[in-house]
Image (cartoon, helix red, strand yellow):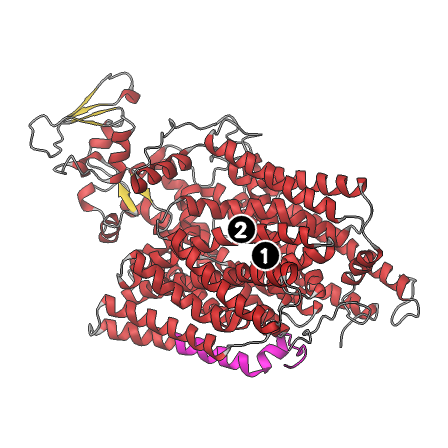
Amino acid sequence: MARNVGKAPSKQIDAEAYWKANLKIIVILLTIWFVVSYVPVLLVNQLNQITFLTGFPFGYYMGSQGSLIVFVIEIFFYAWWMGKLDRQFGLHED
Amino acid sequence: MAVAQKAGLAGFWGNYLARRYTYFTIGFILFSMFVGLLESFGVISNQGIGYLFLLLTLAMYAGIGIMSRTKHLDEYYVAGRSVPAIANGMATGADWMSAASFISMAGTLWLLGYDGLAYIMGWTGGYVLLALLFAPYIRKFGQYTIPDFVGARYEGNRARIVASIAAILVSLTYVTAQVVGVGLIMSRLVGVSYEVGVVVGLMGVLVCSFLGGMKAVTWTQVAQYIILITAYLIPVTMLSLKLTGVPIPQLMYGRAISEINRLETEQLGAPTYTVPFRDVPSNASLRTSLGELNTKYNLGLTIPAATSDASHKGQPWNFLALMFCLMVGTAGLPHILIRFYTVPSVKESRKSVGYSLLFIFLLYFTAPAYAAFSRWEMLANVAGKPVSEIPSWAANWTKTGLLNITDMTKLEGVDGAKPPAWAATLIANKSLVWTDANGDGKIQLGDFVAADPNDATKGGTAGELSGTAVTAKKVDGILQFPELAIGADLVVLATPEIAGLPYTIAALVAAGGLAAALSTADGLLVVIASAIAHDVYAKALRPDAPVANRVRLGKIMILVGAAAAALLALPRLALIAQMVAWAFSLAAASFFPIILLGIFWKRANGAGAIAGMIGGLVVTIFYMYMNYTNPHFNVLGISHLGSGLFGLITNFILTIGVSLATAPPSNEIQRLVESLRLPTSDDSMRSSGPSPVH
């Protein structure tokens, strides 16, 4: 990120870089979202051969708990990451 | 009105509200223990317990509603934009989790096994879309309703009105289902009739939303969340303690699942519960709905023969389409989206989605445990027993019709003119025939004689009963697992009894279900009222209307919405629960693509959005109708519940295609989109703080 950080004189360039950085993290997180929710469904029969924790078939576990845990973490991660990005670009509100 | 008070984690726990809600939670637990104590001394009847819980919780919601009454537009529609992220998370959780989530979710999982997980993942995964794609921008936009957003972004009242109609359609079916839930729970909690339950419950809804709008609704929902999650977690924790010795149901139901697989292999020949993709499109729900309409209104509609399409059984497409529609629909539901107008800032809105999902997660994470434990209990302690020796909790629930034991020996001595519902269904489809041989009007059974000893599917005769449904196993007086038929509502409601808990816990569960239904109904009524009073009246018809009129009209519309929901709820049609599932597909096909493109693609314009919304809705409704009436009409075995997928694709294609074929939106709109993408307000042309109308 060689571009200007903090209160930059040129608002336009700042906004563009900020938006690009935002889109990048959105794409990464959506990819993870897709991988933990849709891929285990496609592979459920194979995953169910694995027994997990107290006796869960792993395919069932991913649908009932595994993917949900990842969803929660992803959202908090995004909030934290964007907070950091806001400060980096001088866009935080306080 | 304090402008955008800073309130993150520290802000929430530091302020007086947090302390107040902590006292509230402790007080509620003490109250429940006190009632439990009264019960154990035998000084209070079950009905008395029900009334205590009902009165206490309703009085409390009313109290919060009255304390938060307001005439200010900002407070009425968006709670003054001062709700801290955690509180908004709880309110969104209560708003989101309806009677269906609370009462029927676990039962659906019991019935569908792995296939039911499409709901669990769908209804939580949607929040990721909400957090990444919508919430911060909706907050930055900072108006009052979703049609506000559509109207501003897509330049004009035409788009706004199409969006208002879609919002009302989605919300009205949804609120009607909540009112049905309220009526059912009230009748169970205190034993009043369903109709009285609907009316009393609606009063509870109105005291909150009528006086205080979004502000009262938000703070009541926080209280309702606390009650509903406490009520949900206690019974299953106790059941886990009883069955496994460890009070962590979410972890321990793994053991229940391996036991289920073992017992199912033993009793059914192969495990079914964790086997995926068994659910196939069928016209069973259409047949139920038509039958209901016929009995309630004497319509004499022809009911088509039962049919289903199993050609895609074992393939994941229906599961994936349903899950996708639920996820995308979640992100497009107006009553959830407007919650992100109520937080103080863009930063808070991002966190708020996280808290929302965390609080929702607590319930969805636990629902499969309810299902697994009660299935285990039924396989281990109910199935395989002689029909005369089933446990008392199961015998009690057979009286409510939520648990049916379909062993034919249950029919011995029953009045043949009034068979139980499950037998009536068999008689109606001619797989069971009763011949009153001795003319006494009662059913008598006898020794089983197979119609064809080499072909079990042909059934046989046992005394006065014959037909394909009469098989050796059906008349042996032993309860086989397939002879247990449950209603989806049974699992959560019966768990306190299975765990051997006192009636106080059952009343607590009912109060929790009531909280879930009321809180969702509240949020939905605000959406309906604002779509009419704000979007259609104040923005499209009378832009010069004074604020006082707009708030007054909003209050009147809440009453009208409530009355409409009550009228629709009174016939208590199963079709309504079905319509809620459809609401997700409709939201996915109408709102999701145009809001997404509105934020992420500057080139999208009004003509494109209108074509997209209408095209999306038309395709969705067409597929829904075709598949609902004839399950053989399907693509890859996708049922009507997943029809939003096709509408969503159509909406995207039309919005993009028509936008490119017509002129780009004005520079003003392009600047609006640019300003949405930045979290700070200094360069925005719209104020994101409380508007200066009051």
Q: Circle 1 — which element?
A: helix
The image quadrant that residue A18 belongs to is bottom right
| B81 relative position to A48: left or right | right
Q: Residue at x 50, y 55 (%)?
A: B364
Q: Residue at x 74, y 71 (%)?
A: B687
- What residue would you read off at disc 2? B170
- Residues rendered magenta in the picture: B1-28
Task: Tell me: residue B304, above or below residue A73.
Answer: above
Q: Is residue B409 visible?
A: yes
Please check the rendered image and state whether residue B7 is part of the magenta-colored stretch, yes or no: yes
Residue B334 is labelled as: 1
Check residue B545 in the rendering and tell me which mark sits there, or answer none.
none
Report in which chain the residue with disc 2 lies.
B
Three-letter residue code for mark 1: Pro
Q: Label 2 neighbourhood size at 10 Å, few (<14), some (14-19), many (20+)? A: many
The answer to whether residue B83 is visible is no
> Image height check: is B324 above or below A94?
above
Q: What residue is shown at x 66% (from left), y 63% (from top)?
A: A76
User: For residue B510, what is the image quadrant?
Assistant: bottom left
Task: Check residue B422 for magenta coloring.
Answer: no
Few, some or many residues within 10 Å of mark 1 (<14, 14–19, 20+): many
